[in-house]
Image (cartoon, rainbow, N blue to C red):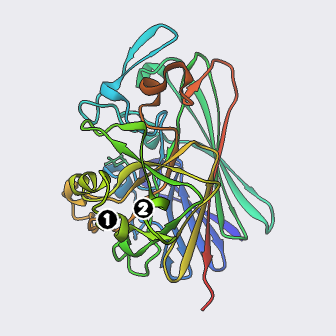
Amino acid sequence: MFTEVEHQRNGLDLIKIDNDRAKIVFSNYGARIVSWKYEDNNIVLGNVVEADEFYFENPFYFGASVGRYGGRIEEGRFELDGKSYQLEQNDPPHHLHGGPQGMNRHFFDYEIKDDNGGFIQIIFTTTLKAAEDHYPGDIKVKIIHTYDIDNRWTIEYAAEATETTLFNPTNHVYFNLNRDNKEIDNHYLSSSDLKVHLLNDKNLPSVDDVVDLNALSDHQPISFKEIFDNEETPLHAQIEKYQGLDHPFTIGDELIVENKQFLLKMETDMPNVVVFTFNETNNWDSDMNIYKPHSGFTLEAQSLPNDINLLGEEAPSILRKGDAFFSKTTYQIIEKSE
Ligand code: G6D
């Protein structure tokens, strides 16, 4: 395994890891994953030419670290320790993905650690400032991306805040295990627990109103197509409305997504995973947009969007002043034998 750094314009660096069969690229802009190729298969969506303009312009958060807060916060408002806060309503009327000054727009400092064969680590650091994003307190954030010889990509988040605040980071990578980025409807999902949290008419999730996908189908795994086509639950009307999924899931110890050739294994210590099937790609009117609806899906590990308004003081996203935040998510790509 080896790394190479390519300096592009405007301060954007590409950090390229080569592991014989797999090639994986990260960037200091948004501490993001730019591409992940297994032999000649693109596992994640991104800019095929790896050019900087793409990341500054595109509205889909490709591969970016997202936060402080991964999901929506209702009308950008919340209360914490008796004080009210108003964030930017950048997804009107809600606040989404940490707002316009979120981590996806940060240029992170970084350092590369090479284990001489076993793994390569990129340690990204930045500071999120209350003066910029209007959450309470500044947070020192460390995001460590590790790629190992077993083709496992691990993301670790470590953080500490100067005031009690919210911290609910995620990564917005889109996967597609099909050879030519053909629609992801043919991918199958399985987990010992596989529940979808229904959304209300304001696009915000419920804690308890869930559809159990393991009970819905008489077999496992269940494909995206079967989920989309099933008319038996209230999920159907929502899938029609969103043209796919944009929903938090509760999963068991691991979530497997597979097609004929590959198996993607995800593990996380975050309470939920938002699955977004890239439903309205035409929102971006640009020559760089080569994507059709359903050409990828996200697996965004995070606590339930809007948890601060749903659960108050019990919300997992609360980070107390001086406490050490740590969270870990892994994605492993496994090629199936012929
Ligand atoms: C997230 O839940 C949201 C979507 O609604 C949004 O369109 C996307 O990010 C860019 O997954």
Neighbour tally class for label 1: few under 14, some 14-19, many 20 plus, Cα within 10 Å:
some
Which residue is at 80% across, 61% downward? 115
Q: Nearer the viewer, residue 275 or 332?
A: 275
Left/right of residue 159 with respect to residue 245 in the rendered view: right
- Residue 86 placed where, x, y %? 35, 18
Amino acid on which the number 1 mark rests in the picture: Asn
Location of the C terminus by quadrant is: bottom right
Which residue is at 56% across, 82% downward? 39
Does the CB distance between marks 2 and 1 fall below 8 Å? yes
Q: Which mark is residue 230?
A: 1
Which residue is at 73% across, 70% downward? 149
- Residue 261 placed where, x, y %? 53, 83
Say whether mark 2 is within 8 Å of ligand 1.
no
- Furthest-top residue in view? 82
Which residue is at 50% across, 42% downward? 107
Q: Which mark is residue 39?
A: none
- Residue 30 placed where, x, y %? 48, 46
User: How many numbered dots are placed on residues in this image?
Assistant: 2
Q: Sequence-wise, which precedes: disc 2 or disc 1?
A: 2
Left/right of residue 177 with respect to residue 93 in the rendered view: right
Amino acid on which the number 2 mark rests in the picture: Leu
In the rendered view, tell whether residue 93 sits above or below residue 34: above
Q: Which mark is residue 216?
A: 2
Location of the N terminus by quadrant is: bottom right
Q: Secondary structure at mark 1?
A: loop
- Residue 134 placed where, x, y %? 41, 20
Q: Is residue 40 visible?
A: yes
Neighbour tally class for label 2: few under 14, some 14-19, many 20 plus, Cα within 10 Å:
some
Q: Is residue 88 visible?
A: no
Left/right of residue 310 with respect to residue 23 in the rendered view: left
Q: Nearer the viewer, residue 191 or 296?
A: 191
